[in-house]
Image (cartoon, helix red, strand yellow):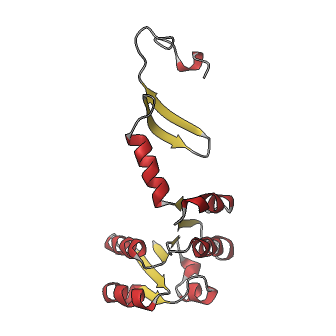
């Protein structure tokens, strides 16, 4: 799989290393000269210096043939722009974007950039799943369908004891 990663910070660099180890063809674009030089020592020919929001930089990196574009810069606006260009202009079907500020997650979703990954949001979800509230254990979220599968312990003799979920009137 040909994967284009824009942003060679800690996230982009580690993603690139893991994907190269899994024998994917990876190219990384980085706009910071210092960061580029550090990563270039390890990734050699798999990194290009340039602004990933510029069309010619994306084209030089081969975005037209990308199976997956991952936008993980430190700037949400850049990640949105890169994701939209990849999808709309170059027809890349699989695009993943990093959302640095969880307040911007809604903007990513409104613009059709899915999945948008927010570290803060992921950690909060993990906490919600690990720390049950009100005796509920979250098992699965189905966001598109606005459904959630939960586990709940029912006390013997309670109104819900022995009653099917469909008959509970939830």
Where residue 124 sits: x, y (%)?
Answer: 45, 50
Is residue 66 depicted above or below 140 in this figure?
Answer: below
Is residue 9 depicted above or below 134 in this figure?
Answer: below
Residue at position x 41%, y 71% from top? 11
Is residue 114 among the parts visible in the rendering? no
- The quarter of the displayed image where residue 20 is located: bottom left
Q: Residue most toward the top?
A: 157
Residue 24 located left or right of residue 109: left
Residue 21 located left or right of residue 72: left
Asked whether 38 or 86 is in front, the reply is: 38
- The quarter of the displayed image where residue 81 is located: bottom right
Residue at position x 62%, y 41% from top? 145
Asked whether 91 or 148 is in front, the reply is: 148
Where residue 163 sits: x, y (%)?
Answer: 51, 13
Residue 59 located left or right of residue 133: right
Residue at position x 57%, y 70% from top? 76
Where residue 31 sits: x, y (%)?
Answer: 50, 87
Is residue 10 among the parts visible in the rendering? yes
Q: In which quadrant will I find the N terminus?
A: bottom left
Residue at position x 64%, y 70% from top? 87
């Amino acid at each position: 799989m040909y994967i284009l990663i824009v942003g060679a910070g800690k996230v982009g660099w580690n993603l690139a290393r893991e994907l190269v180890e899994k024998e994917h063809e990876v190219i990384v674009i980085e706009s910071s000269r210092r960061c580029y030089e550090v990563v270039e020592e390890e990734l050699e020919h798999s990194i290009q210096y340039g602004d990933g929001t510029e069309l010619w930089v994306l084209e030089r990196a081969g975005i037209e043939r990308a199976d997956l574009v991952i936008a993980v810069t430190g700037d949400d606006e850049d990640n949105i722009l890169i994701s939209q260009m990849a999808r709309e202009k170059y027809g890349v079907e699989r695009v993943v974007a990093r959302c640095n500020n969880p307040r911007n997650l809604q903007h990513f979703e409104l613009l059709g950039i899915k999945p948008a990954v927010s570290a803060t949001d992921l950690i909060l979800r993990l906490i919600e799943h690990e720390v049950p509230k009100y005796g509920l254990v979250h098992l699965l979220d189905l966001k598109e369908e606005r459904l959630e599968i939960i586990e709940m312990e029912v006390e013997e003799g309670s109104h819900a004891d022995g009653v099917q979920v469909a008959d509970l009137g939830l």
